[in-house]
Amino acid sequence: MARITIIETGQVPPKYRERHGSFPDMFERMIRSEDPTAAIEVVSIPNGDALPDPGKVEAVLITGAAAGVYDGLDWIVPLEDFVRKAYTNKTPMVGVCFGHQLIAQALGGTVRKSEKGWGIGRHVYQVLPENGVVDGEAVAIAASHQDQVIEPPSDALTILSSEFTPHAGLLYANGATLTVQPHPEFDVEFAQVCCDLRDGKAPEDVVATARVSLAEPMDSAKLGGAITRFLTQRAAR
């Protein structure tokens, strides 16, 4: 039985939390749909929890957040230090959205707000053949971001990409670190909430197109399953 530590870096707005749960709740549902035996523990940075010892966790998943990794918040540098230690230890580690960007920045990559603007709704990403983690030629997943990994770290291989997000999925050379920009933990209803939250912030046509796109089939379970297997199988080694 694998024990996965979810590091919560941002919170679902209170208005939506009762219906949809927290980000860790979403990830727990995603993980348990693939591996019902997985043990989950949550470390919540917004709630003031201390980061765990990176040498004493079996596997780590870092969530999304409204913050930017470049915002200079007092918890970002300690989290980057945690990431570097976990990476050196080859602790199985996954980052999603903010987590994807934070891990890239901590390991030498460049992250910034993209000139392409908001990426919301259903996005389709090409899959690098024979990458060993994600099968198939493409995956369609809900996205919600402005920031992007512009330049990945030198030891990161891009395994998911699109015209809008060239470095949407990274697999690292230590064999134990995987990060993705889109949100396999989101169901369609919460992806629609993310569109609602962009009203007045993103261009109207971008929001409208994103809402319509969510009626198309999604591959959330496929990517979520791949992430879960990545963590649990490496934690068992």
Image: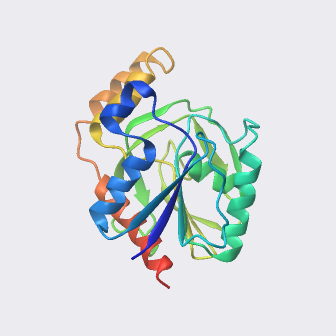
| Image height of 176 relative to 27, above or below | below
Between 214 and 29, the one nearer to me in the picture = 29
Residue 36 as seen in the image, left or right of residue 48: left
In the current view of this chain or complex, which residue is farthest to the bottom? 237
Quadrant in which the N terminus is drawn? bottom left
Residue 217 as seen in the image, left or right of residue 103: left
Q: How is the image coloured?
A: rainbow
Between 182 and 50, the one nearer to me in the picture = 50
Quadrant of the rendered image containing residue 23: top left
Residue, x 36% and y 44% (percent of image)? 186
Residue 62 as seen in the image, left or right of residue 39: right
Instruction: Tell me where residue 111 appears, x and y as whole percent.
Output: 68, 45
Residue, x 28% and y 39% (percent of image)? 188
| Image height of 18 relative to 139, above or below | above
Instruction: Tell me where residue 181 appears, x and y as whole percent.
Output: 51, 49
- The answer to whether one can see residue 107 in this image is no
Instruction: Tell me where residue 78 appears, x and y as whole percent.
Output: 75, 52
- The answer to whether one can see residue 61 in this image is yes
User: How many numbered marks, from 0 up?
Assistant: 0
Quadrant of the rendered image containing residue 190: top left
Quadrant of the rendered image containing residue 70: top right
Instruction: Tell me where residue 105 appears, x and y as whole percent.
Output: 71, 52
| Image height of 30 relative to 199, above or below | below
Residue, x 36% and y 40% (percent of image)? 21
